[in-house]
Amino acid sequence: MITIKKFTLIMLSIILVSVYAIFIKNYEEQREKTANLILNTIKDDVSEVSYLLSKSIKNNEKINKYRAILDRTTSNNSFVSTIMVIDGSEVLITTNPHNNTAPRKADLYYDKSLTDFEYLSTQKGLEGRIRYYQGSTLHELEIVFLFDSDEIKELFNETKLSFFFYFGLFPIVLLYLSWTIIKYSIVKPLEKLRAYAYHQSDIPKKLYIHEMEAIRSSMVQTFSRLDREQKELYKMARTDILSGLANRVSLKEYLERLILDSDYDKKEFAFLFLDLDHFKSVNDELGHLVGDELLTVVSSRVQELLPENSFIARVGGDEFVIILHNYASLTSLTSLMDQLQGCIANQWIIQSHPIHITSSIGIAFYPKDARDLTTLMQHSNVAMYEAKKKGRAQYHFYTEVLNKKVQNTIALDKDMRKALENKEYELYYQPKTDVESGRIIGAEALIRWNSPDRGFVGPNVFIPLAEENGFIIELGNWVLQEAVNQQLEWKQKGMDITISVNVATKQLLDNAFEYVFTSIMDMSGVDPSKIDIEITEYLFLKETQKSLRVLNMIHDYGSTISLDDFGTGYSSLSYLKRFPIDNLKIDKVFMDDYATEDGAVFVETIVKMGQTLKLHVIAEGIEEKEQVEYLSSIGCVAYQGYYCSKPLNVNEFEKFYKAYLTL
């Protein structure tokens, strides 16, 4: 099913393509007419001057006296730069003293297969014949009109600019205005009417299109009448009298609307079942009046904490349903639940009684866990009781696998942040080796986490989470600082090699990155050319203008830029042309397949492309001697991989480097 917005855009796109097809055809026809006019004008001048000279010349020794005729012709025709009279290969007279060499015949050959525009663009001029009698002997001279190519190009460029301005820009402006009119007169009003129909939000303003205004007016009248008739009933039937929150009836109606919207937008939402722990004890020990007042203040406070567009209903004595559909990730969802449970766990003073109470929450998701109110209630209730079984004052997801995953994610998030404070991270370095000489020319810095509790945690475990929750910015800045410090330390030890640092897209696009980068470089005093920044192709899909500015800043500062995993993501030659890339890194997946015909084609194509674009090409994942020999045969500059060495810690790398020098 297609929307009005998409249909309109498709139709306008078809119109635009059609207009430009006509535009291109008309432009080419107009260009050819202009070229024909220029060429015919020059031909006429050739004929006229040839005729005049044929009638006037009696002796070619006195031909210079007719120079005025030639000068007048060149001054009257701006598309002719020089006129020559040639006897064989000797130039008898020329209007341009700096151009006194006879052109080649090929430059004057009139090829009828060429269009007039092609002739003006490829040939240098036109030639004619001067025939005169000296006594009874017929003599023949050549007259050559050389084109003023600069003048001709300027005319066509002016015509092109004018044509593109009036016939290229105007359709775009016209279609943009058409789309704007349609968008604001039809599409947006319909979207507002739909929102009004589902949510009874603000009444849409009066519309200018008669039929749509009739629909709007009818909807407004209908909803206004229903609102007047049902206002009191709604308050009684849909509101919990004690807490002022929605009740089960309101929950059912809201959920029906939300399910329709979620199906339409293909979005999930979270269904939370919240129960106060040991609330019965409050009623039994302090009385129902105290219990009711506690429910009232807790309800009010929880409602204040919930984000906009969320929903809360009281469905039992101390039971609440909360529906959330605007959370960014499971991490943000669990963060909100921590806030809710933290708020409820505060001490409450009710009628001078200090009360401590906690809550348990069960979570189910639509449509993954259930597709209707009854099942959502059942599944979230099951999850809530599971939270109570595990000690109360916590939350639990209906799906055990998801619950375990979320809990592990939360624990991992906390641990990896503490790890930075506790200095548990360490940089390992994998050598980059020159293919021909075997010399170590650099190293790639790779982060490792040795946790006292978890043991070794692979980057594939914590890096994706760090990128999701934004911790990658802080972690990436630490890696950059450590790598710079290590380069300086190695330089003092005689190991002045380039260190490559991986920079995540989110880190590079952070507003503070430029300041962090320049501050680290300036304060350390490191040679910028010894720091190589590695990026991935994913960056090119994110805010390309900002990406280009930041990469240019890095490049202008003196550091090099490497494009990692080239060919596995969003490869495009336009990126290599537009962005300041110095090095291409061939992904291991291509090198694993180098021995096959298809695999070799990919590798050799990347290497040749890098050579053509004057980029250094580095192969990753090299594990065999045969691979190195193959890289040498195709002209690849460098490689890294286990054939040379696995990633090493600082001490191991230093020993390996020194041992390598003695080989």
Image (cartoon, rainbow, N blue to C red):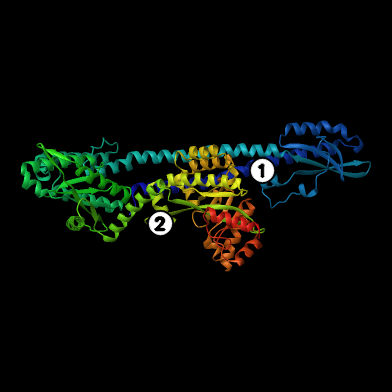
Whole-percent x and y of residue 67?
83, 32
Q: According to the image, label 1 marks what residue?
A: 36
Front-lying residue, 158 or 342: 342
Left or right side of 85 for 641: left
Query: Looking at the rendered structure, which numbered label has been put on residue 461?
Result: 2
- Secondary structure beneath dot 2 equals helix
Nearer mark to the viewer, of 1 and 2: 2
Task: Give me the residue at 34% from left, 52% from top.
Answer: 2
Of pointers 1 and 2, the one earlier in the residue sequence: 1
Q: Mark 1 packing: few (<14 Cα in 10 Å), some, or many (20+)?
A: some
The type of residue carrying mark 1 is Asn
Query: Looking at the rendered structure, which numbered label has been put on residue 477?
Result: none
- How much space separates mark 1 and mark 2, taking CA atoms? 70 Å
Task: Give me the residue at 93% from left, 44% from top.
Answer: 136
Whole-percent x and y of residue 335?
29, 47
Whether residue 218 is visible here, answered yes or no, is no
- Secondary structure beneath dot 1 equals helix
Left or right side of 130 for 635: left
Left or right side of 552 for 262: left
Front-lying residue, 118 or 472: 472
Residue at the limit of the structure toward the bottom, as seen here: 596
Residue 302, placed above or below residue 592:
above
Front-lying residue, 142 or 559: 559
